[in-house]
Amino acid sequence: MSRPISELAERFWSGAVPPGQLWKPTGQVEEMADGVFFLHTFANMTVDAAPVVAAIYTHGHADHALGLPPFLAEARERGRPRPRIVGHRNVAARFARYRRTHGYNALINARQFGIAPTWPQDYDAPDLVYDTTLTFTAGEVGLALTHARGETDDHTWIWWAERRILWTGDQFIWVAPNAGTPQKVQRYAGEWAASLRDMRMREPELLIPGHGVPIVGRARVAQALDDAAEWLETRERETRSRA
């Protein structure tokens, strides 16, 4: 049986994938654990064929929080309940800031990504928000949501304890963490590292990152989280020592 995502993940881990290909989406879907399907896109999703009950924003970046309109429209057209939208309280504030500064965001993203200077102005804000932690239950699935500042101030990482599955959002993305540039808003290297250490303490066996492919196996997940945390801690420590 073909397992394209697992095979790609093995090549990621071994370093066989060239850096320029790390985030290139394949569009492949694979069942990574029983009932957990991974869709390899630019910003990753886990999906199945059932109607969408809820969507959890790991943060409010456009590549992670603007994919819901087709699912919301489908629910309306078929007379289904509107999917819940879950996220940290700061997501709505981010969307409000994006509306006020859409011209500036269009410009800096055009510079960063080499794209046309456009920026969205329509957003679907969370209707269920939290501050520090939240236990979210859908059917028989119970997920632990934890807020952590890092790449953003509105980040959520998700832990399914029963299955030992971790969703990191952009707290882990297979490359050196982007802890700040002169044209971006404040980022939080120390708290970012602390969140990765917290995730590692859960002893996950499957890590679903914000970008890139899954990491399978407790030892590999631990190494990935530890390495990223150490990188951030070292960067912050060395920066302060030279201030």
Image (cartoon, rainbow, N blue to C red):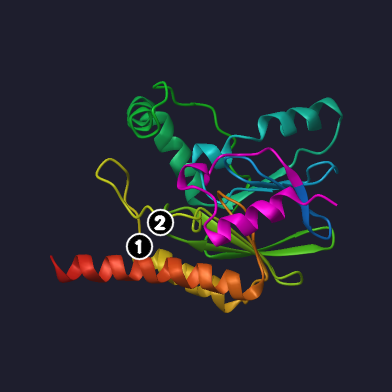
173 vs 187, nearest the viewer: 173
Residue at the spot 50% in from the left edge and 58% down from the top edge: 172
Q: What residue type is labelled 1?
A: Ala
Q: Is mark 2 on a helix, strand or loop?
A: loop
Q: Residue 177 carries which label?
A: 2
Magenta includes 97?
A: no
> From which residue to which does the magenta span run?
1-29
Residue 242 in picture, x, y percent from top left: 14, 67
The residue identified by callout 1 is 189
Magenta includes 26?
A: yes
Residue 108 in picture, x, y percent from top left: 33, 32
Local crowd size for mark 2, using a 10 Å CA cut-off: few (<14), some (14–19), many (≥20): some
Measure the alpha-carbon separation of dots 1 and 2. Answer: 9 Å
156 vs 91, nearest the viewer: 156
Q: Is mark 1 on a helix, strand or loop?
A: helix
Q: Can the viewer see residue 130 in this picture? A: no
